Amino acid sequence: MIQPVIITVALVGAEVLREHTPYIPITPDEIAKDAFECYKLGASIAHLHVRDEKGMPSQDKEIFKEVTAKIKEKCDIIIQYSTGGAVGMSIQERIQGLENMPDMATLSTGSINFGDEVFMNTRAQMIEIAQGISKYGVKPEIEIFDTGMIDSALYLLKKGYISMPIHWDFVTGMLGGVRASKEALQYMVPLLPEGSTWSVAGIGRSQFEIAKESILLGGHIRVGMEDNIYLEKGVLTPSNAALVEKTVKIIEELEPKTKRRVATIQEARAILNLKTV
Ligand code: KMH
Ligand code: ZN
């Protein structure tokens, strides 16, 4: 069955600072406003990180609660918390927000270099995160930064720490991770168990090219300033909304060929097997 395209917007992340771009949303009000603007343009999922008063990455559950409440005042976009946080954070710090019971939360199934540091996810740590996600009835999104991480996730599935239907997100184009290429997707997608759904994020300049490949191959899309701060070469995006708007145009341009349009929130909930609200 041809599925409409779910757009996830990764609004802020943990790495982009005001010194990189003045447009990154930082405060709860800014993050909620961006989420709402992206929702109006067609985004169905808000992938959330939060920041402290100094604008630095935080996983404070109270800040997550405040941001979530501010978004929910405005719209019913699907709320997805990061459990990745920032490099160097403890697992307990990373997963504290699960208590707020967001619709979804990420689960990275492997470690990878982030600049000069390591985003650490040992097997024991993955299990701890998976158990937290399951305890609060949250739907995981499995983050795949490199191909072997698929097998680590399948191990968690076999051992019962996660269950089908799995939603996967290929985070492509990180230095040291899987490439943002059609060939990489063509290798990875057939490895996923029947009934899986998947999306693709492209880091930096690869964001829109790989989004196109994902649409053509039947996947969903993640865009946003966590992954890419440029609207085009040398031009900072003025907002997350501008990135979503460009994504919607790509989906519409490809529609005669793919018969795929932008998913509504209700469609996204059905595709992802989430509770309807
Ligand atoms: N900020 C990265 C170290 C996630 O959101 O789950 C981890 C990350 C993944 O962003
Ligand atoms: Zn993230």
Image (cartoon, rainbow, N blue to C red):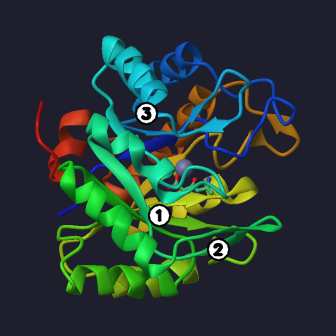
Residue 187, x across and y down, in percent: 47, 87
Mark 2 lies on a secondary structure that is strand
What is the C-alpha distance between the residues marked 3 and 1? 33 Å
Label 2, ligand 1: CB separation under 8 Å: no
- The residue wearing badge 2 is 112
> Residue at the spot x=32%, y=19% of the render?
72
> Residue at the spot x=12%, y=42% of the render?
275
Looking at the rendered structure, the kind of residue marked 2 is: Ile
In front here: 100 or 47? Answer: 100
Residue 262, x across and y down, in percent: 35, 41
Residue 155 appears left or right of 217:
left
Q: Who comes first in sequence, dot 1 or dot 2?
A: 2
What is the C-alpha distance between the residues marked 1 and 2? 23 Å
Looking at the rendered structure, the kind of residue marked 3 is: Lys
Q: Who comes first in sequence, dot 3 or dot 2?
A: 3
Residue 235, x across and y down, in percent: 84, 35
Q: Who comes first in sequence, dot 3 or dot 1?
A: 3
Mark 3 lies on a secondary structure that is helix
- The residue wearing badge 1 is 214
Q: Please say if the residues under marks 3 and 2 sit with CB atoms less than 8 Å apart.
A: no
